[in-house]
Structure formats: structure tokens, C-alpha cells
Image: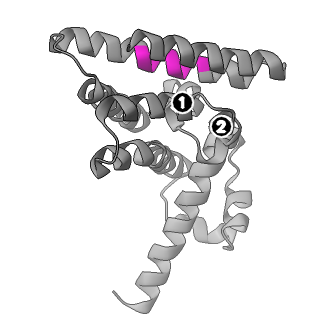
Amino acid sequence: MGHSKAEKADSHERIVRIAAARLRELGADAIAVADLMQEAGLTHGGFYRHFASRGDLIDESIERALSDGANGAFAAEASGKLARRALLLAVIDWYLSPQHRDGLATSCAVTSLAADVARGSARARAAYTRQVAAYLELFVRLMEGDAPAGTKRAEAIALWSGMVGALSMARAVNDERLSHEILKTAADDLKGRLA
């Protein structure tokens, strides 16, 4: 790859990485191209060398945010360092932690981008659907026991929905004690169901 092509690829990567973080923090409506390009150290005019439109940027950034948010769970599974059940419990504990709740820029985009994606493009919805399905498959793989696949899938859907819903509520309330109570109660309940 030539020097200018490599620079363009690096710039494109930087724009998408920054946009994915801002999407999780602020939502799609708050993304201003001029501000994003400035944060990336690039000129506003250079935007169209990378994207056909703001919508293309949003779609690519949603795809990135969704894939980045799940990397930890899938990497932990691949490492094989934790038994399946222990890994599933660790994922619940991490997902429903104050650190994850407060770390919007690096958080799981399944929760932080749900409303944006529901109003978004077919490309964004397809990426979201793939990520939700990947998490469900992961949870089914991590569930122990001899339950039929359909039963495990139903349990995975209930688990994932509970995690996403609890995190959304914990982020939305303005009472810190209630937020912690939501996270802890949901985590304890979901882990108890897996016992």
C-alpha cells in the first residue's frame, strides 16, 4: 500500500473509532461531522474522501461499536481460561457493573445504541441483529446442563434481555443508590436462574 493510501486508511480508521465512541456516549443525533473531523485531527472538507454521506459514517460506526463491545466476552471464551459457567457469571457481573454503566464510550453498543438503531438504516439494523444473535449463541454455548437447545435459547433470550434492560434502566435513573440496586438485583436474579 502506498504512503497516501496508508495514511487514508489510518485516517479512516481513526474517524470510525472516534465516531463509534461518540455514538455510544451521545447517540447518532449528536454526531456533528465538523466536530468529529476536528477530534480526528482532520479537516471538515476531507470527510467526503472517506464517506459518501453522514449516514454512511453512522452505519460504519454502528457496525464498529457493536463488534468492539463484544470482543471481551468472545476473547474470554476463546481463551478457555474459565469454565463455561464461570465465564457466563463473569459476563453478567461485568455487564451489570457500575464501571460498564458509566463507561459509555467503550460500553456494549447493544444497550447504548438500541434506540438509534431502531430508527436507523437497514444496514445498522442488520449489524445489530447479527450482534444480538452472536451474544445469544455465546450464551447458549456457555449454559451447562442437558436442556434442549430450544430451552437454552429461550433462557439465553431472557438472560440477554434482562441484562440489556437492567443496564438501560440503571443508566437512565438519576438516583445513584437506585441505579446500584437495579444492577445488583438484576445480576443476582439472573445468576440465580442459572444455578
Q: Nearer the viewer, residue 79 or 123?
A: 79
Residue 165 drawn in magenta: yes
**Which contiguous range is marked in magenta?**
159-166
Q: Is residue 6 above or below residue 67?
A: below
**Image spot of residue 8 (x, y percent):** 48, 77
Residue 16 drawn in magenta: no
Residue under the image location 62 percent in, 37 percent down = 100
- The alpha-carbon separation of the residues under discs 1 and 2 comes to 25 Å
Label disc, if present, on residue 64 of the rendered structure = none
Q: Which residue is mark 1?
A: 93
Q: Is residue 88 above or below residue 173?
A: below
**Which image quadrant is residue 3 in?**
bottom left
**Image spot of residue 98 (x, y percent):** 69, 33
Report the predominant secondary structure element of the magenta stretch: helix
- Check the picture and name the quadrant holding the N terminus: bottom left
**Which image quadrant is residue 18 in?**
bottom right
**Image spot of residue 84 (x, y percent):** 30, 33
Regarding mark 2 in the picture, which secondary structure is present there? loop
**Image spot of residue 183 (x, y percent):** 64, 21
Q: Which residue is mark 2?
A: 27
- Check the picture and name the quadrant holding the C terminus: top left
**Kind of residue at disc 1:** Asp
**Kind of residue at disc 2:** Gly
